Image (cartoon, helix red, strand yellow):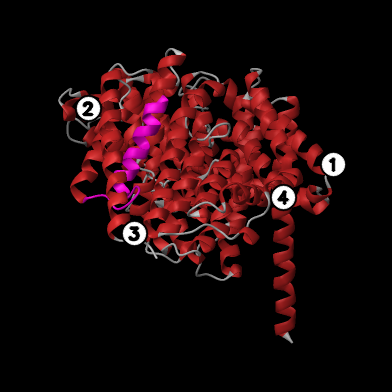
Amino acid sequence: MPGPHGSGSLNTGEKIIKVIIGGIGVGISLFHLYTGAFGTLEAYSQRFVHLLTLMTLAFLIYPTSKDWSSKKNNLVGIPLAVLCAIIEVYLFTNHQRIVGREWYYGPMTLWDFVFGIALMLLLLEAARRVVGLALPIIATFFSFYALLGSYFPYPFTIRAPSFQVFLDHMFLTPQAIFGIPTGVSATFVFLFILLGTFLEQTKGGQFIIDFSMSLVGRATGGPAKVAVVASSLFGTISGHSVANVYGTGTFTIPLMKKMGYKPELAGAVEAAASTGGQIMPPVMGAAAFIMAEILGISYLSVCVAAIFPALLYYVAVFSATHIEALKQNLRGLNAEEVPPFFPTLKRGFHYFIPIVALVVVLMMQYTPFRAAFISIIILIITAEMRKISRLNLKGFYEAMLGAAKNGCVIAVSCACAGIVVGVLDVTGLGIRFVTIVTELSGGIFPLALVLVMISCLILGMGVPTAPAYIIAAMVAAPTLVHFGVHPIAAHMFVFYSALLSAITPPVALAAYAGAAIAGANVMKTGWHACRLGFITFIVPYMFIYNTALLGMGSPTFVGWSFITAAFGTVAVATGLTGYLFTHIVMWRRPLYLIAGILCLIPETYTDTIGLILASILIWLNYRKKKQEEVCFPTA
């Protein structure tokens, strides 16, 4: 008797929770669509509504432990979700008092203390659930450092604030948890996530894969090139490396393995290609929006600065996969396996309309916030005009719920990174970091660059790119500016360095995702992904010394710098892979690397030397190929 009754009660409880999750998800998506149409709330209000609603959702969706039953997880998750909702109501009812007070002077009430401490603990737990342990550990370390930094040895000693000042800054000001990172998540980023989920629900993701296959599927190493093209297109919408891997990799990785790619290489191709989506305009992920806010420049300016490095990245990945396919004699797909180009384009050309509209609206100097809203409306209208992409009520529901679920990751990770930003702000630690790097490098600028990149890699271990960039930008970018680097170049250097953490072992989230789908060794996949995305290690140093690769300077010099850099990228890929027309003699491989790096340096004399050296090496390899054909003719 108790069994069926208990079972029925459990099912009813799960259904109720599912309804609540759906209501919260659709509600927060409608809230952002409303603010996209009619304007945002006051900054602090917009941010706490966004963050605490999505934290409530996160505790209902993400389990405390994957080893626990759903009932046991709910016993912990539901009370935490309710507590998030209570804090949201508290901030709403006390909004006028909070935003109208003098920071640090108006006395904090007992409930301010209680809910402030509770929010920090809840945020750390939410971050652990949605992005793993790395980010909350970093935030916890910085919090303790802020309170106990006066006891650290020189040069790490800081003047620690009182606990009240620390908590006030974290909870009751728009400078820390509810600072710029959360603000960007609460405005631009959520609407772009919503654009991505609507594109997915209207079958735009499948069109991207089919379109990529029709373009390059029959080429040498076709499946790998499909992964590169599809991930670059998919990445311009999603802007998240791990999401890109799962979005396209579930199709492309099995296809690559079927065509003869080793699992580690298949996972690495997808990881490297997906990571580049975060630097490919027009949508570059949360980090790019945050960069624009920090620098006080338009998002379009960030896109312009990013376009040439992004193209170089994909030249590197595309050429490396092509050379690897030649080396291993991996063919393309058969004609019957590839969808025809023009029928595919005819079926899905309308998916390009909202993307083109997005670029046009941005060029018209509208904010990314309004541009994203307009693109969503255009996407919905064009999708409804075609039977293949038309949405019913369930489709709208799934798109809005999907956006809320994806938004949890960005909102929680940005807010958790906001703890670090708040610590840097309230302690002056950012200025101290400038002193530390200057002293460790002895004032030697190239060494300072290396130290900054290493710092970004460490801060980014196991952390999504957006919070990794936020933390590193607040700590490291001022150091580069102190050395005289242009602010945009400094932030792009930090952005690229943070991006590396997605494919650099020992903690490489994108490589982990690719390895999981491919059933491959994680470390080998990570190292292969590093090799494919090698340009990310080199180009940041190049645009620090000459900003032509960021689109700055005369059009002629910018164009010449990009062309020679693209040639150098292919030369480096050739040297790393060890194959061009035929296998390259081992002692010549470093010469390809040298020629490529010389071409990457945007100076006329280095470009000239690099081009001459590369031309000689290519001719020697071509002659070796002809000699092999004479000595060992094919049947």
- Which image quadrant for residue 546? top left
Residue situated in front as seen by the camera: 477 or 223: 223
- Residues packed near mark 2 inside 10 Å, few (<14), some (14 to 19) or many (20 plus): few
Residue 401: % across, % down: 70, 50
Q: In whole angstroms, how far apart are the C-alphas of marks 2 and 1? A: 56 Å
Q: Is residue 554 left or right of residue 96?
A: left
Instruction: Say whether residue 436 is visible.
Output: no
- Residues packed near mark 3 inside 10 Å, few (<14), some (14 to 19) or many (20 plus): some
Q: Return the residue at label 2.
A: 446
Q: Return the residue at label 4.
A: 201
User: Does residue 508 show up magenta in the picture?
Assistant: no
Task: Tell which tag, 2 or 3, sits nearer the viewer.
Answer: 3
Q: Return the residue at label 1.
A: 385
Q: Is residue 56 left or right of residue 380?
A: left
Residue at point 38%, 44% (across, down): 533
Residue at point 51%, 18% (across, down): 297
Q: How many marks?
A: 4
Q: Secondary structure at mark 1?
A: loop
Q: Amino acid at mark 2?
A: Pro
Which residue in the rendered view is the most extreme toward the left? 442
- Which image quadrant for residue 300? top right
Vertical position of residue 496 compared to residue 72: above or below = above
Q: Which residues are magenta?
A: 562-585
Vertical position of residue 144 compared to residue 524: above or below = above
Q: Amino acid at mark 3?
A: Lys
Q: Amino acid at mark 1?
A: Met
